[in-house]
Image: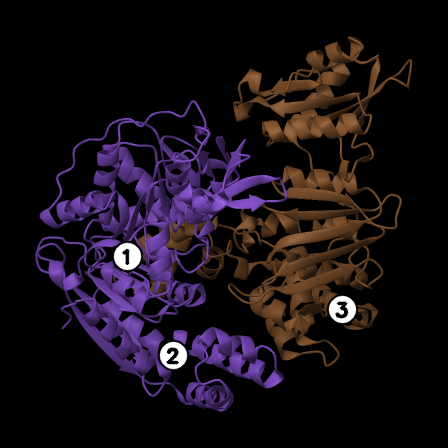
Amino acid sequence: MRLLFDHGTLVLAEAPELKAERVPGLLWDPRVALFRAPAWRYSEVCAALHHCPPPLRDEVRPSGLPEPASYDALQLPPYQRAALLSWELSGRRGTIVLPTGSGKTQVALAALGSAAVRALCLVPTRALLEQWCSALRAVYRGPVGCLGDGHRELQAITVSTFESAYRLMPRIGARFELLVLDEAHHFGSGVRDEALEMSIAPQRLGLTATPPSEPALSRLGELIGPIVYQLGIADLAGRWLSDFDLVTVQLGLNAVERASYDADHRIFVAYSRRSRRSDPEGSWRDFVSLAAQSPEGRAALLAWQRNRRLLHFTEAKAQAVGVLLARHRDSRVIIFTADNRAAYDIAREHLVMPITCDIPRAERAAALSAFRAGTLRSLVSARVLNEGIDVPDADVAIIVSGTQGEREHVQRVGRLLRPVPGKRATIYQLATRATVEARRASERRYALATANVAAR
Amino acid sequence: MLPQMLLRASLHLEGDRIVPHYFTAQDEPWLRVLIDEYARFVGHQCSELHERLARSPSARAPKSKRRIAVRLLDALCLARPSAAVPPKEARAAVFRAAACSLSPRIDVLRSVAASFAVSAAELERCLFADLRSEWRVGDSPSGLSPSRIASDANLALIASLIRRAAHVRIAVRANPGALVRHARIVGLICRESPLEQTDDGVVLDVSGPFALFRHSEIYGRALASLVPRVLSSEQFELSATCALERGARLLTLVVRSGESIGISPAPSRLERRLDQKFEQDFQRAAPEWQLVREPSAIACRETLIFPDFELIFRQDPTRRWLLEIVGFWTREYVCEKLRRLRAAGIERFLLCVDQKRECAEAELPVDPRIIRYKTRIDARAVLALLTAGYPT
């Protein structure tokens, strides 16, 4: 029997007598008249086939792959050492949950050094691609490959964006023995999961501050492994993370905004109540799906969208941003908005550098360096700074609005928690009174609290 | 690709069947008005045009169709404006100056503008001139007509649905070879069978390797790339199983020639570099042989074979060989192919197999018609086989 890698799957050739049900994941593919299994089940398939005659010839890995070079030794604080040990004891499969700013990348670098195998690190954004490559170059003695943002260089240790991995895994899925997934909570819900399913890597390490809820968590368990170590912000705040104050600023709507909001809210609520009566257990997705099929439903969805857009950046919020920027002139401030439009409005009005997906990579990197050096004192961003980006000097955040719920909020707060001696961060959350935003602000505060946060 | 909400609003369901709301000749009057509106706004910021369009919805233009048409016209007509100061330089100077100054906003802008020898207002215009929201309406391309927008919109609708498919079945009457080769080049598995009750029709079942395990959109882009080629065929029927949302039930889309979806121009041939190199090398090495790309399919028992090349000896056109380049293969695959060829009485056939699959020489059946290659097919080795006279 011969096992081959074919476009993100395993193909079993010369196995005329095989009973497929004995091999996990193996199916008969009538299109090519061969057995086929998804690549992520490589270890299980090999283990099962070794017990089946005739002898197996494993030809999955291409020849001529470079061996990884060595790593410099890293000094890890006790909680990071414990996280690494837990992962190793779990057979090098599993997810480590640590709060933002607590050094998840350091744990990953130590894991890479300890595993000493060919590895592919997956990151969600182009900005993080660059950050990971730099972090690896600082400790890894060989060349670091890079896939994404115009780069296409494959090495024994390679960093890739999720998007590039999704596109290229059918071709490169047999080249790596270890997958490292930064911000692993992006997986498990079906979007881009194929990037994990098309890799044979038996060793997998997921990193996140905000693990997903069920059923995505179970799926993540299958594809990466279970949560093997978990700490919250309160476990580390004070010594390993900065302390912080969370201030919710309640603002109003002007007369025109209020009239528009109330009118659209009535349209949405009227339809929503009718819809809930007919399907009380339906999810938001079910609701949208149903609404899209009728003119009234579509009108309700449009009204909901208009209100969301309105709340993203009201007149009062625009004024509040100006007041807070003036108050914190000597601080390093990050402003988070819900969309790029609001980010550019703030950039224009207050002459604050925007960090968005439209700004070219080199310019973004230069702006972040200038922020660290103090020649830029504030940045405004919709999503790019939400996750992973290292801005340890930031000590004030203004959260103007968000679209992604509690997880986004926890991630944003985490941007300010990277420890610097003597730092105490201040986070302003702007919310509009007598709208859905006021309730959401409470929910977000609660989400931080349940993430073991000692917010005051 | 059209976004999900727009796509959802551009179709309805009849049972499990998707019925797209195609653009027809009835849409051409309001499309003409829309094109004229773009022409009137040449030189203006695209946001001004979009505001104007939002204020003046045409009663005769269905909302979703109008949004699709605007997306297409934006792609064709919007252009980046020129800027007196490169936006990147303007941003670096303005935001850094603002960070280290206590002066009011306008004073910061004036001071930086002076260093670039432009006005403060001009500098402000340059700050984000490279962003798409700042783009201007440009001249529309020549040949832009309502019928072209209508057929482009129908193509976008069908391609967006196929992007959500995992499996496509295509029945065509003419030139199936181009479709088969296209599918193979983009990494799809293509099963071919003759179309019943026709002489030259073919049914192609196209899907990706991973589609065996679950419905996945990972092949959506590759499958959608087949759509222009299918629509440019004279007679076809395309059917696909699509999920409009992740995890939703699977629905069927059927598109047939004869439906009023407009005529799609035939796309240019998808080139594989390996084929190009072989063509060049062989023509240089063997000028006495004529090389024909994509010859007709050959019926081979219950299936069809699509050779990549036909090699014809110029002085004696009865000396013809067929050549197929095989990407992924196994021993069973090659043996089966040779068996079928033999059974169909086709002896003058060369199979070029990719040596990177790393099968030992002994594993391949001993057959002089098999040529191994790594990154380039050796044209001289092919010529040697042709001139060796096997079989005479």
Mark 1 touching mark 2, by CB under 8 A? no
Looking at the picture, which amino acid does disc 1 mark? Ala
* Residue B241, position as x, y percentages in the image: 64, 59
Q: Which chain is brown?
A: B
Q: Residues within 10 Å of mark 2 (few under 14, many from 20)?
A: some
Q: Quadrant of residue A100?
A: bottom left
Q: Quadrant of residue B296?
A: top right
* Residue B114, position as x, y percentages in the image: 41, 53
Q: Say which residue label 1 marks.
A: B99
Q: Which mark lies nearer to you, 1 or 2?
A: 2
Looking at the picture, which amino acid does disc 2 mark? Glu
Question: Which numbered tag is attached to residue B31?
Answer: 3
Question: Which numbered tag is attached to residue A315?
Answer: 2
Q: Residues within 10 Å of mark 3 (few under 14, many from 20)?
A: many
Q: Residue at x 57, y 80 (%)?
A: A298
Q: Which chain is purple?
A: A
| Frontmost residue, A75 versus B175 | B175
**Placement of A392 over or under B154, stated as above or below:** above
**Placement of A174 over or under A258, stated as above or below:** above
| Frontmost residue, B319 versus A287 | B319
Q: Do circles 1 and 2 both sit on a common chain? A: no
Q: CA distance from mark 2 to mark 3?
A: 37 Å
* Residue B277, position as x, y percentages in the image: 67, 23
Q: Is residue A416 left or right of residue A49?
A: left
The quadrant of the rendering that contains the N terminus of chain B is bottom right
Q: Quadrant of residue A423?
A: bottom left
Q: Residue at x 24, y 27 (%)?
A: A70
